[in-house]
Image (cartoon, rainbow, N blue to C red):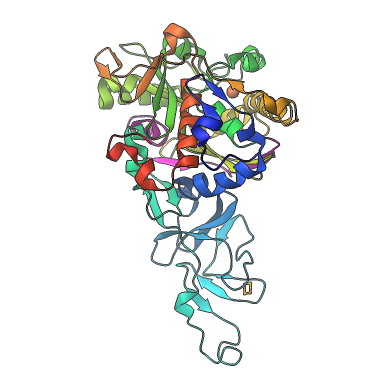
Amino acid sequence: MAIAPNQKYKDAYVDLSKGQISREIFVNEEIYQRELEQVFARSWLFIGHESQIEKPGDYFISGMGEESVIMCRDRESKVHVFLNSCRHRGMKVCRYDEGNTPVFTCPYHGWSYATDGKLAGIPYFKDAYHGEIDRTQWGLVEVAQLRIYKGTVWATWDQTAPPFLEYLGDFKMFLDLSLDSWDGSEGGSEVIGGVQKWMIPCNWKFPAENFSGDSYHNISHRSVDMVGIGPSGTGRRDMNERNQAKRLHILFPERGHHTGAYLLPKGDSTPPAYQDSPVVSEYFAHCERERRRVRGEWSRLVGSPGEIFPNTALHPRQPRTIAVWHPRGVHQTEVWRWYLVDRAAPDEVKNFLREYYIRYSGPGGLTEQDDMENWNYAHSASRGTIARRYPYSYEQGLGYERADFEVDGLKFPGLVTDLSEVKSSEDNLRNLYRRWADFMDADSWDVLANWRNGSGA
Ligand code: FES
Ligand code: FE
């Protein structure tokens, strides 16, 4: 079912005045193809972490939308992101997941590229090409913009997109909750272990909306809460902290980013003892004291799942991960999950967290398995001819988001819902689709960067 030429996605599929969204946007092939152009080719996307490519020649193969890209560090130590496709006939110039190389040699006919993307070698250059092909024109295709922020690498194919920090806007403070060290010092995160990658049979927006802060699906995780997979052995996280904190949703309508957050009680807060490990317990107690000292009242703000539009999910702590929902056709998603720790943490702490992370997240993680079961069955049960006729309901909390939210003298940017009062809201989910429709409808970044003129997209 194609959209009529004069219709907007905002009206045809995403009706936020009623809080209803068409199932078509999850299952329609034509809409999916348009997403690749309108959303993925124009947004800032998460590529990886600098700690994955520390030395010159190090590379990590990542993805942007459906396409494979090479994140690498050249001989001068500069980081690049290139399309992983040979300029001669399109072969993947790198078929490994990661490694170190002085040069990427295409396995098809042997063109070779330096780690700065320049075409370095062409077989039979003098004989077959008569020395005439202009090698400077045939380097690897490089992203239009790249930004390294506190160790994380971001890129976009769109030269006209706003710079990364402008794209983030006031959401920056929430990305910082994932990237700063637990003691409150700036940056200092590193990737631990490998990146977990796996396929799930659902549209990429199912996990994207869930990690926007679907505060309504707690029932799905009842079993892990009962088993107590959390770091202190109760619930799936540190439940005491969670239960005492004020729970918030914060969203940014002009940017399409949103997150959950916890505001810890005033005064000292002591983390629980971590499974009788004095080293781990002391590390977090120390960090907690330090964070309070460095950040004052704002140290009470700790992260909860959230998302940078369109497909980068942040899980700032417990466990601390970054996920990307790579589109792989309208009915399939490839999930990549990175696991972060404080670089300066003792090995015992890193190992403790690694074990907790993988029993929570990833294909073998008990909590993530709960989620995947929902997304996968929801997708398959929404594909049918009859099912597609009926919209989903996103009415929860519609119209109750608050501007100028302030608590204990802490003024929050964006629109906020206090979940401690209302238990749950679908505000963040609506925010994802509001921005998605903006991207699907807008012809250019002049329209999408609506904060520059205050007019709204
Ligand atoms: Fe790469 Fe021909 S496709 S050298
Ligand atoms: Fe969940």
- Coordinates of residue 450 in the picture (x, y in percent): 33, 38
Taking 144 as reference, is 213 left or right?
A: right
**Is residue 237 positioned above or below 80 on the image?**
above
The residue range painted magenta reads 173-202
Magenta highlight on residue 359: no
- Coordinates of residue 64 in the picture (x, y in percent): 54, 50
Please tell me which residue lies in front, 401 or 308: 401
**Which quarter shows the N terminus?**
top right
**Is residue 153 positioned above or below 119 on the image?**
above
Which residue sits at x=47%, y=10%? Answer: 243
Taking 363 as reference, is 315 left or right?
A: left
Taking 295 as reference, is 59 left or right?
A: right
**Which quarter shows the C terminus?**
top left
Please tell me which residue lies in front, 121 or 250: 250
Please tell me which residue lies in front, 315 or 310: 310
**How many numbered discs sit on the rendered protein?**
0
Which residue sits at x=51%, y=88%? Answer: 132
